[in-house]
Image: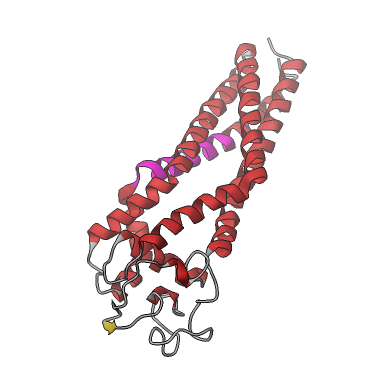
């Protein structure tokens, strides 16, 4: 019984770590799906500078609606993260109990279940890397819907907030250019000033991190030296989305390798000495 003790100790340590990781994934997944209040407090800090510039910094209804839109877009990812975290936590508990008590049946069940999960993770990140451009196009599609409905920053709609929030940091204008804004108004109010005869949306101007216009003479006139009118958002949005999604994919690869190690140690533990 003591011959497999080193392997069992390794299993206990690894399952403790993966169990903690599973709980963290569980918490983040739950936050993305059901944590509107928590996300409100987080996102409001990023939205406040933009809303202050539009003169509607106290309009909580618009912030709540925007967060609802964000949650709608991220909830499938949250559900997947929550489910994966729950599965990882349960599997870690089974492996931990099997290693502690040296129960053969638990270790067999553990090895079989974790093998299924490992194959599922392999499938997930394989599909992502094979089709990540198509997945990123989905994010562009959501942004394009807001661009199509955009009228002005003064209207303070969810679509105006999405456009105003995304374009300045990404330094771009429209999906493929300013011509995508078919419904924009020629008059707008931003930063306490009224602008007439607008050629393009105000969020196409150069802005700083506080969403203050820093492009000289913009939006009175739009040039390459004071705005992003020559830079569409399609490619930069896709690359930014892929950049952050790659972190999630690398996390899945790490989980795959950890689970593979767990399977090997479990098989080794069973083969050496289990009563």
Toward the viewer: 27 or 58?
58
Q: Position of residue 260 (x, y in %)?
A: 70, 31
Q: Is residue 258 above or below residue 265?
A: below
Q: How many marks?
A: 0
Give the position of the N terminus as an image quadrant: top right
Q: Quadrant of residue 207?
A: bottom left
Going 32% across and 70% down the picture, which residue do you hit?
152
Can residue 242 be seen in this snapshot? Answer: yes
Q: Is residue 241 above or below residue 77?
A: below
Per the rendered image, the range of residues in magenta is 18-35
Q: Is residue 21 magenta?
A: yes
Going 60% across and 16% down the picture, which residue do you hit?
106
Toward the viewer: 240 or 40?
240
Going 75% across and 22% down the picture, which residue do you hit?
268
Which SS type dominates the magenta stretch? helix
Q: Is residue 135 magenta?
A: no
Going 62% across and 43% down the picture, which residue do you hit?
128
Q: Horizontal placement of 154 versus 10: left or right?
A: left
Q: Quadrant of residue 266?
A: top right
Q: Position of residue 65 (x, y in %)?
A: 29, 54
Asked which colour scheme the image uses, the reply is secondary structure
Q: Quadrant of residue 6?
A: top right
């Amino acid at each position: 019984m003591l011959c497999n003790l080193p392997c069992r100790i390794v299993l206990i340590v690894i399952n403790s770590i993966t169990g903690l990781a599973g709980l963290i994934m569980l918490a983040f997944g739950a936050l993305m799906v059901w944590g509107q209040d928590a996300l409100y407090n987080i996102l409001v800090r990023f939205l406040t500078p933009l809303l202050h510039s539009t003169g509607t910094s106290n309009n909580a209804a618009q912030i709540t609606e925007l967060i609802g839109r964000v949650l709608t877009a991220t909830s499938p990812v949250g559900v997947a993260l929550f489910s994966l975290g729950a599965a990882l936590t349960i599997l870690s508990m089974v492996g931990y109990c099997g290693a502690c008590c040296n129960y053969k049946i638990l270790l067999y069940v553990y090895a079989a279940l974790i093998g299924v999960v490992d194959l599922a993770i392999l499938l997930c990140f394989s599909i992502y890397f094979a089709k990540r451009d198509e997945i990123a196009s989905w994010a562009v599609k959501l942004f394009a819907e807001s661009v199509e409905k955009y009228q002005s920053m003064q209207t303070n709609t969810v679509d105006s907030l999405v456009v105003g929030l995304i374009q300045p940091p990404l330094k771009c204008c429209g999906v493929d250019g300013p011509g995508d804004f078919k419904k924009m108004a020629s008059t707008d109010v931003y930063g306490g000033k009224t602008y007439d005869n607008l050629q393009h949306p105000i969020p196409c101007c150069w802005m700083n991190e506080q969403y203050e216009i820093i492009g000289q003479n913009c939006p009175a006139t739009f040039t390459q030296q004071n705005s992003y009118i020559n830079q569409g958002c399609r490619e930069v949005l896709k690359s930014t989305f892929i950049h952050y999604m790659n972190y999630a994919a690398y996390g899945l690869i790490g989980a795959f390798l950890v689970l593979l190690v767990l399977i090997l140690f479990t098989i080794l533990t069973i083969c050496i000495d289990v009563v």
